[in-house]
């Protein structure tokens, strides 16, 4: 029998707040974290807005010596891991006395480190040796594991904007199969000029705001952030009296390989990942009460995702409510689905659906019930959380309200 997996700790850094409580209260109030770029000069770009983290101070979480060992992505990873471990009520002794896995996803890794190195070299400035040590992305796992004395299996996923869901699903498998009792899993991405430039060149950015599923949407908003979940084997969590936010019920991965950047117009990969996730969770489409959409705000992505959702769940009248918190945060790349997984756990705990802000005019090609602009109280038993990426990488995870006794579906 497959072991059950529950979520007992959450750490979040988002453009609307550092920390789970601040991020959650800001999302619940419909606050936007999008503004004109501050990290670099945006004047040369067509689009000048992004979702940047504004209140992160590494000194809150680590010493100067520790900061010197890490790039910005590793600092985010360290901070959300520290927050999640504390939230889960785990001691260092409990972590070091057992195998703890660490699975992390990212799109750009420590790209901003390489940008800084190249700029200094072009300008003839010396580059401190430690800067080169910050660049390898595995440092975001290895440095943090070393700091917290974690000794289990680890893996780094580069599945673009689906990477967070890939990490969470694979970490759940570690626990299900008895390899570990505890796993840290999630995603991280730091704002980088190279990503901002790339999306500008693709003409896929909205110059004003992120408005998923709206008829007048023009594109996504580049963002940053990090989130990790503490995932535990159910009996292990119950034995130590842990607070349980939600249960991980299943996941599905898909690959349509339709185009390097464009989604399959009929959402083939998305469709496959959602159907696989339902089967993995032993659930039927009608069991899902809410869908946390990938919902980037680009015309093609929102249309393709809507097509896949309608194919699985039925036409508009039969669909569960859908919303996209990217409307508030922007698109945090590999961190996006991890942040959305954390938010989904909190939606289950609080029995409320977060809104899609900036939704003004429905698109007949898209989902109509987008929990428009204000949150909605509702009974939530099961959430499907989607993440789709360049190259046709797709992933869906299903999170459920925890019940110690399994109820027949």
Image (cartoon, rainbow, N blue to C red):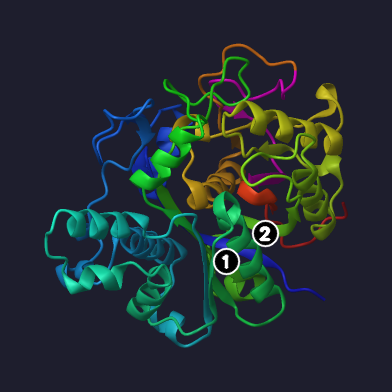
Q: Is mark 1 in CB contact (under 8 Å) with mark 2? A: yes
Q: Horizontally, is 68 left or right of 377 in the view?
A: left
Q: Secondary structure at mark 1?
A: strand
**Which mark, by number, is residue 248?**
2
Q: Nearer the viewer, residue 210 or 63?
A: 210
Classify residue 374 by image quadrant: top right
- x, y percent for residue 372: 59, 20
Rendered position, 315 above or below 85: above
- x, y percent for residue 231: 57, 66
Taking the spot 46% from the left edge, 44% from the top edge, the residue there is 332
Q: State yes or no: residue 386 in magenta.
A: yes
Q: Residue furthest top?
A: 361
Q: Horizontally, is 397 left or right of 296 in the view?
A: right
Label 1 to label 2: alpha-carbon separation = 8 Å
Taking the spot 16% from the left edge, 66% from the top edge, the residue there is 127
Q: Nearer the viewer, residue 332 or 371?
A: 332
Q: Residue furthest left?
A: 125
């Amino acid at each position: 029998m497959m072991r059950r997996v529950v979520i007992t700790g959450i750490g979040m850094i988002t453009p609307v707040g550092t920390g789970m409580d601040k991020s959650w209260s800001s999302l619940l109030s419909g606050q936007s974290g999008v503004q004109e770029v501050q990290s670099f000069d945006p004047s040369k770009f067509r689009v000048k807005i992004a979702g940047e983290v504004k209140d992160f101070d590494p000194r809150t979480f680590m010493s100067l010596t520790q900061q010197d060992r890490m790039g910005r992505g590793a600092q985010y990873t360290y901070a959300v891991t520290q927050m999640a471990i504390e939230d889960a009520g785990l001691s260092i002794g409990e972590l070091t006395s057992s195998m703890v896995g660490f699975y992390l996803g990212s799109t750009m890794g420590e790209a901003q480190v390489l940008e800084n190195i190249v700029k200094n070299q072009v300008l003839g400035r010396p580059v401190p040796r430690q800067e080169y040590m910050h660049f390898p992305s595995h440092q975001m796992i290895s440095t943090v594991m070393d700091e917290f004395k974690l000794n289990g299996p680890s893996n780094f996923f580069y599945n673009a904007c689906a990477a967070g869901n890939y990490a969470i699903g694979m970490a759940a498998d570690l626990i299900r199969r008895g390899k570990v009792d505890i796993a840290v899993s999630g995603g991280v991405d730091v704002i980088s000029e190279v990503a901002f430039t790339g999306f500008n060149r693709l003409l896929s950015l909205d110059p004003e705001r992120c408005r998923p599923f709206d008829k007048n949407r023009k594109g996504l908003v580049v963002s940053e952030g990090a989130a990790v979940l503490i995932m535990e084997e159910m009996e292990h969590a119950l034995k130590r009296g842990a607070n349980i936010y939600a249960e991980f019920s299943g996941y599905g991965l898909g690959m349509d390989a339709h185009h390097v950047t464009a989604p399959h117009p009929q959402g083939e990969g998305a469709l496959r990942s959602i159907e696989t996730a339902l089967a993995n969770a032993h659930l039927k489409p009608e069991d899902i009460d809410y869908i946390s959409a990938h919902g980037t705000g680009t015309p093609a992505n929102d249309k393709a995702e809507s097509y896949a959702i309608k194919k699985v769940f039925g036409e508009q009248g039969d669909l569960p409510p859908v919303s996209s918190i990217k409307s508030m945060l922007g698109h945090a790349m590999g961190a996006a689905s991890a942040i959305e997984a954390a938010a989904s756990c909190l939606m289950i705990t609080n029995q409320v659906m977060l809104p899609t802000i900036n939704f003004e005019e429905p698109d007949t090609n898209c989902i109509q019930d987008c929990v428009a602009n204000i949150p909605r109280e509702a009974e939530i038993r099961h959430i499907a959380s989607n993440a789709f990426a360049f190259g046709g990488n797709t992933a869906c995870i299903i999170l459920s309200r925890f019940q110690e006794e399994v109820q027949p579906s």
